[in-house]
Amino acid sequence: MSAPLLSISRRTRSTPFTRRVEAAGVRAYTVYNHMLLPTVFRSLEEDYWHLREAVQIWDVACERQVEIRGPDSARLVQLLTPRDLSNMPVGQCFYTPMVDETGGMLNDPVTLKLADDRFWVSIADSDLLLWVKGLAAGLRLDVAVEEPDVSPLAVQGPKAEDTVAAVFGEQVRSIRFFRFEPMLLDGQEYIVARSGYSKQGGFEIYLQDSTHGEALWDAVVEAGEPHGIRAGGPNLIERVEGGLLSYGNDMTRQNTPHECGLGKFCQTADAIGCIGRDALIRVIMEGPQRQIRGLRIDAQGLPFTIQPWPVTAQGVGAGQVTSSAWSPRLEATVAIAMIERDFWDAGTAVTVETPLGPRPAEVVNLPFE
Ligand code: THG
Protein backbone atom coordinates (compact mmCIF):
# COMPACT_ATOMS: atom_id res chain seq x y z
CA MET A 1 0.00 0.00 0.00
CA SER A 2 1.41 3.42 -0.89
CA ALA A 3 1.17 6.35 1.47
CA PRO A 4 -1.47 9.01 0.75
CA LEU A 5 -0.32 12.14 -1.07
CA LEU A 6 -0.87 15.77 -0.09
CA SER A 7 -3.08 17.67 -2.55
CA ILE A 8 -1.33 20.99 -3.12
CA SER A 9 -3.26 24.11 -4.15
CA ARG A 10 -3.23 27.85 -3.62
CA ARG A 11 -4.25 27.42 0.04
CA THR A 12 -1.17 25.29 0.70
CA ARG A 13 0.97 28.26 -0.16
CA SER A 14 4.23 27.77 -2.05
CA THR A 15 7.30 29.74 -0.98
CA PRO A 16 9.93 31.82 -2.78
CA PHE A 17 12.16 28.71 -2.57
CA THR A 18 9.71 25.95 -3.59
CA ARG A 19 11.12 25.48 -7.11
CA ARG A 20 14.62 24.98 -5.68
CA VAL A 21 13.27 22.62 -3.01
CA GLU A 22 11.59 20.49 -5.69
CA ALA A 23 14.76 20.50 -7.82
CA ALA A 24 16.65 19.29 -4.72
CA GLY A 25 14.37 16.23 -4.58
CA VAL A 26 12.03 16.91 -1.64
CA ARG A 27 10.31 13.66 -0.56
CA ALA A 28 7.82 14.92 2.05
CA TYR A 29 6.09 18.13 3.03
CA THR A 30 4.01 19.11 5.99
CA VAL A 31 1.72 22.16 6.03
CA TYR A 32 2.60 24.93 8.50
CA ASN A 33 0.87 28.31 8.66
CA HIS A 34 -1.04 27.22 5.52
CA MET A 35 2.31 26.92 3.68
CA LEU A 36 4.51 24.06 2.44
CA LEU A 37 7.28 23.02 4.82
CA PRO A 38 9.74 20.43 3.45
CA THR A 39 10.44 17.73 6.06
CA VAL A 40 12.35 14.93 4.29
CA PHE A 41 14.84 14.87 1.42
CA ARG A 42 16.75 11.52 1.47
CA SER A 43 15.32 9.92 4.61
CA LEU A 44 14.72 11.18 8.14
CA GLU A 45 17.84 9.30 9.34
CA GLU A 46 20.15 10.27 6.47
CA ASP A 47 19.05 13.89 6.81
CA TYR A 48 19.65 13.68 10.59
CA TRP A 49 23.27 12.51 10.28
CA HIS A 50 24.02 15.03 7.57
CA LEU A 51 22.58 17.91 9.68
CA ARG A 52 24.85 16.92 12.59
CA GLU A 53 27.96 16.56 10.43
CA ALA A 54 27.80 19.19 7.67
CA VAL A 55 25.40 22.01 6.75
CA GLN A 56 21.87 22.21 5.39
CA ILE A 57 19.72 24.84 3.70
CA TRP A 58 16.13 24.86 4.94
CA ASP A 59 13.06 26.49 3.37
CA VAL A 60 11.38 27.76 6.54
CA ALA A 61 9.39 30.50 4.80
CA CYS A 62 6.41 29.03 6.72
CA GLU A 63 7.80 30.80 9.79
CA ARG A 64 5.60 33.75 8.82
CA GLN A 65 6.15 37.19 10.28
CA VAL A 66 3.44 39.18 12.02
CA GLU A 67 4.81 42.70 11.63
CA ILE A 68 3.70 45.24 14.23
CA ARG A 69 4.68 48.85 13.63
CA GLY A 70 3.64 52.25 14.91
CA PRO A 71 3.63 54.22 18.15
CA ASP A 72 1.73 51.54 20.17
CA SER A 73 3.75 48.57 18.88
CA ALA A 74 5.80 47.94 22.06
CA ARG A 75 2.59 48.09 24.10
CA LEU A 76 0.83 45.63 21.78
CA VAL A 77 3.71 43.11 21.78
CA GLN A 78 3.82 43.16 25.60
CA LEU A 79 0.06 42.42 25.65
CA LEU A 80 0.83 39.15 23.87
CA THR A 81 3.51 37.63 26.12
CA PRO A 82 4.44 37.06 29.77
CA ARG A 83 8.11 37.62 28.81
CA ASP A 84 9.19 41.07 30.05
CA LEU A 85 10.12 43.07 26.93
CA SER A 86 10.75 46.39 28.70
CA ASN A 87 14.55 46.09 28.34
CA MET A 88 14.61 44.32 24.96
CA PRO A 89 17.24 45.96 22.72
CA VAL A 90 16.93 46.58 18.98
CA GLY A 91 18.79 43.74 17.20
CA GLN A 92 17.60 41.11 19.69
CA CYS A 93 15.53 37.95 19.11
CA PHE A 94 13.51 36.65 22.07
CA TYR A 95 11.76 33.29 22.32
CA THR A 96 8.34 34.47 23.49
CA PRO A 97 5.51 32.24 24.76
CA MET A 98 2.22 33.93 23.79
CA VAL A 99 -0.94 33.28 25.78
CA ASP A 100 -4.67 34.03 25.86
CA GLU A 101 -6.64 35.43 28.80
CA THR A 102 -6.64 31.99 30.52
CA GLY A 103 -2.85 31.67 30.25
CA GLY A 104 -3.25 29.06 27.48
CA MET A 105 -0.51 28.90 24.85
CA LEU A 106 -1.49 30.54 21.53
CA ASN A 107 1.94 30.31 19.89
CA ASP A 108 5.65 30.16 20.78
CA PRO A 109 7.24 32.58 18.31
CA VAL A 110 10.63 34.22 18.08
CA THR A 111 10.12 37.99 18.40
CA LEU A 112 12.60 40.33 16.68
CA LYS A 113 12.87 43.99 17.67
CA LEU A 114 13.75 45.87 14.45
CA ALA A 115 13.25 49.36 15.92
CA ASP A 116 11.57 50.88 18.98
CA ASP A 117 8.36 51.01 16.96
CA ARG A 118 8.73 47.93 14.75
CA PHE A 119 8.67 44.20 15.61
CA TRP A 120 8.46 40.90 13.73
CA VAL A 121 6.74 38.03 15.51
CA SER A 122 8.09 34.93 13.74
CA ILE A 123 5.25 32.55 14.37
CA ALA A 124 4.75 28.83 14.91
CA ASP A 125 1.74 27.06 13.41
CA SER A 126 -1.34 28.99 14.56
CA ASP A 127 -3.18 31.97 13.07
CA LEU A 128 -1.69 34.52 15.43
CA LEU A 129 -2.17 37.34 12.90
CA LEU A 130 -5.94 37.24 13.55
CA TRP A 131 -5.52 37.49 17.35
CA VAL A 132 -3.07 40.41 17.03
CA LYS A 133 -5.25 42.23 14.51
CA GLY A 134 -8.28 41.68 16.74
CA LEU A 135 -6.52 43.14 19.77
CA ALA A 136 -5.19 46.11 17.82
CA ALA A 137 -8.62 46.91 16.37
CA GLY A 138 -10.56 46.22 19.57
CA LEU A 139 -8.24 48.37 21.68
CA ARG A 140 -8.01 51.05 18.94
CA LEU A 141 -4.20 50.91 19.10
CA ASP A 142 -2.10 53.16 16.88
CA VAL A 143 -0.37 50.31 15.01
CA ALA A 144 -0.31 48.55 11.64
CA VAL A 145 -0.42 44.74 11.82
CA GLU A 146 0.35 42.82 8.63
CA GLU A 147 2.02 39.72 7.24
CA PRO A 148 4.83 41.21 5.13
CA ASP A 149 6.63 39.59 2.17
CA VAL A 150 9.30 38.11 4.46
CA SER A 151 10.57 34.53 4.23
CA PRO A 152 13.23 33.01 6.50
CA LEU A 153 15.81 30.68 4.97
CA ALA A 154 17.70 28.67 7.60
CA VAL A 155 21.31 27.48 7.32
CA GLN A 156 21.94 24.90 10.04
CA GLY A 157 24.75 22.57 11.05
CA PRO A 158 28.40 22.74 12.13
CA LYS A 159 29.48 24.28 8.79
CA ALA A 160 26.71 26.91 8.80
CA GLU A 161 28.95 29.75 10.01
CA ASP A 162 31.56 29.13 7.29
CA THR A 163 28.79 28.97 4.71
CA VAL A 164 26.98 32.15 5.75
CA ALA A 165 30.32 34.00 6.14
CA ALA A 166 31.13 33.08 2.54
CA VAL A 167 27.82 34.64 1.45
CA PHE A 168 27.64 37.82 3.56
CA GLY A 169 31.21 38.34 4.79
CA GLU A 170 33.24 37.65 7.90
CA GLN A 171 31.13 40.04 10.05
CA VAL A 172 28.48 37.33 10.46
CA ARG A 173 30.89 35.42 12.72
CA SER A 174 30.51 38.11 15.40
CA ILE A 175 26.69 37.89 15.51
CA ARG A 176 25.85 36.40 18.90
CA PHE A 177 23.17 33.75 19.62
CA PHE A 178 19.68 35.19 19.15
CA ARG A 179 20.99 38.53 17.84
CA PHE A 180 20.54 39.78 14.29
CA GLU A 181 22.08 42.30 11.91
CA PRO A 182 20.88 43.72 8.61
CA MET A 183 23.31 42.66 5.84
CA LEU A 184 23.58 43.51 2.15
CA LEU A 185 23.87 41.13 -0.79
CA ASP A 186 23.66 42.38 -4.38
CA GLY A 187 21.95 45.56 -3.19
CA GLN A 188 19.25 43.68 -1.24
CA GLU A 189 18.92 43.91 2.55
CA TYR A 190 18.62 40.68 4.54
CA ILE A 191 18.16 40.28 8.29
CA VAL A 192 20.74 37.69 9.39
CA ALA A 193 20.16 36.11 12.82
CA ARG A 194 22.06 33.44 14.69
CA SER A 195 19.06 31.22 15.42
CA GLY A 196 17.15 28.27 14.03
CA TYR A 197 15.09 25.22 14.86
CA SER A 198 17.99 22.85 15.57
CA LYS A 199 20.63 22.40 18.25
CA GLN A 200 23.44 22.16 15.66
CA GLY A 201 23.95 25.92 15.44
CA GLY A 202 23.33 28.17 12.48
CA PHE A 203 21.64 31.21 11.04
CA GLU A 204 18.31 32.37 9.71
CA ILE A 205 18.35 34.75 6.75
CA TYR A 206 15.14 36.76 6.39
CA LEU A 207 14.43 37.41 2.69
CA GLN A 208 12.39 40.61 2.30
CA ASP A 209 11.42 40.35 -1.38
CA SER A 210 10.16 37.05 -2.80
CA THR A 211 11.53 37.82 -6.26
CA HIS A 212 15.08 37.40 -4.88
CA GLY A 213 14.42 34.03 -3.22
CA GLU A 214 16.05 31.83 -5.83
CA ALA A 215 19.11 34.10 -6.05
CA LEU A 216 19.53 33.85 -2.27
CA TRP A 217 19.10 30.06 -2.33
CA ASP A 218 21.69 29.75 -5.13
CA ALA A 219 24.21 31.97 -3.32
CA VAL A 220 23.92 29.87 -0.13
CA VAL A 221 24.21 26.57 -2.02
CA GLU A 222 27.28 27.81 -3.91
CA ALA A 223 28.95 28.98 -0.68
CA GLY A 224 28.12 25.71 1.05
CA GLU A 225 29.35 23.41 -1.69
CA PRO A 226 32.89 23.00 -0.23
CA HIS A 227 31.19 21.94 3.05
CA GLY A 228 28.84 19.40 1.46
CA ILE A 229 25.65 21.46 1.79
CA ARG A 230 22.35 19.74 1.03
CA ALA A 231 18.71 20.72 1.30
CA GLY A 232 17.07 19.68 4.54
CA GLY A 233 14.36 20.78 6.93
CA PRO A 234 13.51 20.80 10.61
CA ASN A 235 14.39 17.19 11.49
CA LEU A 236 12.07 15.22 13.77
CA ILE A 237 14.84 13.07 15.29
CA GLU A 238 17.14 16.02 15.95
CA ARG A 239 14.45 18.25 17.44
CA VAL A 240 13.07 15.57 19.76
CA GLU A 241 16.60 14.78 21.00
CA GLY A 242 17.18 18.52 21.46
CA GLY A 243 13.86 19.06 23.24
CA LEU A 244 12.62 21.69 20.77
CA LEU A 245 8.84 21.92 21.12
CA SER A 246 6.35 21.94 18.26
CA TYR A 247 3.22 24.05 18.77
CA GLY A 248 0.07 22.04 17.97
CA ASN A 249 1.95 18.80 18.66
CA ASP A 250 3.64 19.08 22.05
CA MET A 251 1.51 21.95 23.34
CA THR A 252 -1.81 23.57 22.58
CA ARG A 253 -4.11 26.23 24.02
CA GLN A 254 -4.86 23.69 26.79
CA ASN A 255 -1.31 24.17 28.19
CA THR A 256 0.30 27.01 30.12
CA PRO A 257 3.91 28.08 29.43
CA HIS A 258 4.85 26.52 32.78
CA GLU A 259 3.51 23.13 31.75
CA CYS A 260 5.59 23.49 28.57
CA GLY A 261 8.79 24.13 30.53
CA LEU A 262 8.79 27.69 29.18
CA GLY A 263 8.56 29.31 32.62
CA LYS A 264 12.19 30.41 32.25
CA PHE A 265 11.08 32.68 29.38
CA CYS A 266 8.34 34.33 31.51
CA GLN A 267 8.71 37.21 33.97
CA THR A 268 4.97 37.37 34.51
CA ALA A 269 5.05 39.77 37.48
CA ASP A 270 7.01 42.31 35.38
CA ALA A 271 5.08 41.73 32.15
CA ILE A 272 2.71 44.61 32.81
CA GLY A 273 -0.19 44.50 30.36
CA CYS A 274 0.17 40.83 29.36
CA ILE A 275 -3.33 39.54 28.69
CA GLY A 276 -2.82 36.25 30.54
CA ARG A 277 -1.02 37.84 33.49
CA ASP A 278 -3.64 37.33 36.21
CA ALA A 279 -4.32 33.74 35.11
CA LEU A 280 -0.60 32.93 35.01
CA ILE A 281 0.05 34.45 38.44
CA ARG A 282 -2.55 31.97 39.79
CA VAL A 283 -0.83 29.12 37.89
CA ILE A 284 2.54 30.05 39.38
CA MET A 285 1.11 30.02 42.92
CA GLU A 286 -0.48 26.58 42.48
CA GLY A 287 2.42 25.15 40.46
CA PRO A 288 1.87 23.19 37.24
CA GLN A 289 0.13 19.79 37.50
CA ARG A 290 2.01 18.38 34.49
CA GLN A 291 5.12 19.25 32.56
CA ILE A 292 7.03 18.44 29.35
CA ARG A 293 9.59 15.67 29.75
CA GLY A 294 11.64 13.35 27.56
CA LEU A 295 10.82 9.65 27.40
CA ARG A 296 13.22 6.93 26.34
CA ILE A 297 10.95 4.19 25.01
CA ASP A 298 12.15 0.61 24.74
CA ALA A 299 10.70 0.00 21.27
CA GLN A 300 11.69 0.07 17.62
CA GLY A 301 9.73 0.57 14.40
CA LEU A 302 6.96 2.73 15.86
CA PRO A 303 4.87 4.85 13.47
CA PHE A 304 4.64 8.67 13.66
CA THR A 305 2.70 10.05 16.63
CA ILE A 306 -0.45 11.13 14.78
CA GLN A 307 -2.55 11.10 17.95
CA PRO A 308 -1.07 11.34 21.46
CA TRP A 309 -0.15 7.95 22.98
CA PRO A 310 -1.35 7.44 26.58
CA VAL A 311 1.30 7.02 29.27
CA THR A 312 0.47 4.97 32.39
CA ALA A 313 2.30 3.99 35.59
CA GLN A 314 1.06 1.29 37.95
CA GLY A 315 -2.14 1.24 35.90
CA VAL A 316 -3.04 4.92 36.32
CA GLY A 317 -2.85 7.78 33.82
CA ALA A 318 0.56 9.48 33.87
CA GLY A 319 0.39 11.65 30.74
CA GLN A 320 0.79 11.39 26.97
CA VAL A 321 3.48 11.14 24.29
CA THR A 322 3.09 13.87 21.69
CA SER A 323 6.19 13.45 19.44
CA SER A 324 8.56 10.51 18.96
CA ALA A 325 11.27 9.20 16.67
CA TRP A 326 13.80 6.40 16.46
CA SER A 327 17.21 7.81 17.33
CA PRO A 328 19.89 5.90 15.41
CA ARG A 329 22.52 7.51 17.65
CA LEU A 330 20.95 6.69 21.05
CA GLU A 331 19.51 3.41 19.69
CA ALA A 332 16.16 4.02 21.36
CA THR A 333 12.86 5.64 20.55
CA VAL A 334 13.08 9.16 21.93
CA ALA A 335 9.93 11.09 22.72
CA ILE A 336 8.52 14.33 24.04
CA ALA A 337 5.68 13.82 26.51
CA MET A 338 3.45 15.77 28.88
CA ILE A 339 3.84 13.99 32.24
CA GLU A 340 1.73 14.37 35.38
CA ARG A 341 3.46 15.68 38.49
CA ASP A 342 3.55 12.39 40.45
CA PHE A 343 5.57 10.76 37.66
CA TRP A 344 7.75 13.53 36.19
CA ASP A 345 11.01 12.84 38.09
CA ALA A 346 13.84 11.61 35.85
CA GLY A 347 14.24 7.85 36.18
CA THR A 348 10.53 7.10 36.74
CA ALA A 349 9.46 3.90 34.97
CA VAL A 350 6.26 4.24 32.91
CA THR A 351 4.38 2.38 30.17
CA VAL A 352 3.54 3.92 26.79
CA GLU A 353 0.42 2.62 25.02
CA THR A 354 1.88 2.70 21.49
CA PRO A 355 0.03 1.65 18.32
CA LEU A 356 2.12 -1.56 18.52
CA GLY A 357 1.02 -2.22 22.11
CA PRO A 358 2.33 -1.29 25.57
CA ARG A 359 6.08 -0.58 25.76
CA PRO A 360 8.28 0.23 28.80
CA ALA A 361 9.80 3.71 29.01
CA GLU A 362 11.84 5.89 31.34
CA VAL A 363 11.29 9.59 32.12
CA VAL A 364 14.36 11.69 31.26
CA ASN A 365 15.16 15.38 31.37
CA LEU A 366 15.34 17.32 28.09
CA PRO A 367 17.46 17.66 26.04
CA PHE A 368 18.42 13.98 25.68
CA GLU A 369 21.87 13.03 27.08
N1 THG B 1 12.91 30.47 14.02
C1 THG B 1 12.10 31.48 13.66
N2 THG B 1 10.78 31.41 13.76
C2 THG B 1 10.21 30.27 14.25
C3 THG B 1 11.01 29.19 14.67
C4 THG B 1 12.40 29.31 14.55
N3 THG B 1 8.86 30.19 14.34
C5 THG B 1 8.26 28.91 14.59
C6 THG B 1 9.01 28.08 15.60
N4 THG B 1 10.44 28.05 15.21
C7 THG B 1 8.86 28.67 16.96
N5 THG B 1 9.34 27.78 18.01
C8 THG B 1 10.64 27.81 18.49
C9 THG B 1 11.02 26.86 19.41
C10 THG B 1 12.31 26.87 19.92
C11 THG B 1 13.22 27.82 19.50
C12 THG B 1 12.84 28.77 18.58
C13 THG B 1 11.54 28.77 18.08
C14 THG B 1 14.60 27.88 20.04
N6 THG B 1 14.82 27.52 21.31
C15 THG B 1 16.15 27.42 21.87
C16 THG B 1 16.20 26.20 22.77
O1 THG B 1 15.16 25.82 23.29
O2 THG B 1 17.28 25.68 22.92
C17 THG B 1 16.66 28.59 22.69
C18 THG B 1 15.82 29.75 22.95
C19 THG B 1 16.52 30.78 23.82
O3 THG B 1 17.43 30.42 24.59
O4 THG B 1 16.12 31.96 23.78
O5 THG B 1 15.53 28.26 19.35
O6 THG B 1 13.18 28.38 14.87
N7 THG B 1 12.63 32.60 13.15
Image (cartoon, rainbow, N blue to C red):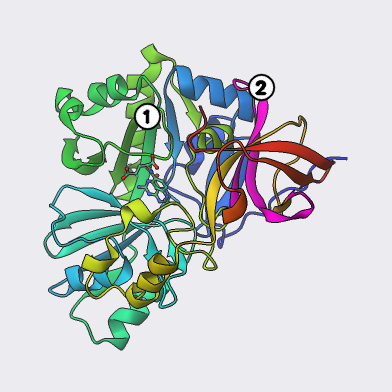
Between residue 128 and residue 298, name the one nearer to us.
298
Q: Gap between marks 2 and 1, in whole Å?
A: 36 Å
Asked if residue 1 lies left or right of residue 118, the reply is right
What is the x, y in percent for residue 346? 56, 38
Task: State the residue position of label 1.
Answer: 218
**Is the magenta region chiefly helix, strand or loop?**
strand
In the displayed structure, 206 sits above or below 186; it is below
Q: Residues within 10 Å of mark 2 (few under 14, many from 20)?
A: few
Task: State the residue position of label 2.
Answer: 331
Whether residue 192 is visible, yes or no, is yes
Query: For the point 56% across and 63% down, which residue is it?
Result: 11
Query: For the point 32% across and 53% down, which residue is it?
Result: 265
What is the x, y in percent for residue 114? 17, 54
Q: Earlier in the sequence, mark 2 or mark 1?
A: 1
Q: Residues within 10 Å of mark 1 (few under 14, many from 20)?
A: few
Amino acid type, mark 2: Glu
In the displayed structure, 245 sits above or below 148; it is above
Asked if residue 360 lies left or right of residue 156, the reply is right
Query: For the point 33% across and 57% down, which residue is it?
Result: 96
Q: Image quarter for residue 40?
A: top right
* Range drawn in magenta: 313-339
